[in-house]
Image (cartoon, rainbow, N blue to C red):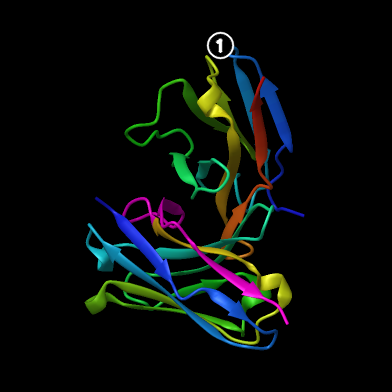
Amino acid sequence: QSVLTQPPSASGTPGQGVTISCSGSSSNIGNNYVYWYQQVPGTAPKLLFYRNNQRPSGVPDRFSGSKSGTSASLAISGLRSEDEADYYCAAWDDSLSGVVFGGGTKLTVL
Amino acid sequence: EVQLVESGGGLVQPGGSLRLSCAASGFTFSSYRINWVRQAPGKGLEWVANIKQDGSEKDYEDSVKGRFTISRDNAKNSLYLQMNSLRVEDTAVYYCARGYDSSGYLPGYWGQGTLVTVSS
């Protein structure tokens, strides 16, 4: 049972857009930055967003991150086959004094 | 280029010990918090521990408190995870992950991971 809640799966066809949600509480998302990671199976995670919506260099602007209250979202527009991966949200949790992750969302590009 | 290379994984019996290492290069190691994050086979990411730049603060996930110890040697650009009293449920790929910037807690750059298997 993950502290942050994500849908287990999402899907879309090439060219479409998709949004992945991440729900938390006041001790994590509500009071701290949200990070997003992309993980292609068999490889290490890659940072997609830090501090809610800051994109590291090299991340396409088809990806966008947002946060409102105790929830956050990752939006991907113009889906491509290479976007097929697992996506995780994460935040610092003040009550646990640790990093908490969402359970991950498996994105399938049909 | 930021590089993090984990080593020390392997097969160990329940109750045994293992010490993981992470060799860092391409950045000023002493300026960043470093995390250990693990991923059990077929499961999601789970944060294990992190350590402040000078080693003065350490935080642990509840299930590893008292069994795992995170440490660092800034002179050697190295991070360690001493794992004692290992359990079957500790089986996972263990990643070393640096904070994105010098003020960041959460992972920004990741190593490729080292597999720890706890089994009799």
The image quarter containing residue B66 is: bottom right
| Chain where mark 1 sits | A
Residue on which disc 1 sits? A15
Direction from residue A110 to residue B25 in the image, left or right: left
State which region is magenta.
Answer: B99-120
Q: Quadrant of the C terminus of chain B?
A: bottom right
Query: What is the secondary structure assignment of the residue under circle 1?
Result: loop
Residue at 55%, 18% (x, y): give it.
A79
Q: Which of B95 and B119 is in front in this view?
A: B119
Give the amino acid type for the residue marked by disc 1 in the picture: Gly
The image quarter containing residue A83 is: top right
Instruction: In the rendered view, tell whether residue B91 sits above or below residue B107.
Output: below
The picture places residue A25, in percent across and down from the top left corner, at 68, 47
Residue A49 makes an appearance in the image = no
Residue at 63%, 72% (x, y): give it.
B117
Q: How many labels does the image show?
A: 1
Instruction: In the rendered view, tell whether residue A52 sits above or below residue B43.
Output: above
The picture places residue A58, in percent across and down from the top left corner, at 34, 32
Membership of B104 in magenta stretch:
yes
Q: Which of A34 and A102 is in front in this view?
A: A102
The picture places residue B8, in percent across and down from the top left corner, at 46, 76
Residue at 37%, 50% (x, y): give it.
B100
Mark 1 Cα-neighbour bin, 10 Å: few <14, some 14–19, many ≥20? few
Direction from residue A47 to residue A93 in the image, left or right: right
Residue at 70%, 53% (x, y): give it.
A3
Instruction: In the rendered view, tell whether residue A47 sits above or below residue A108.
Output: below
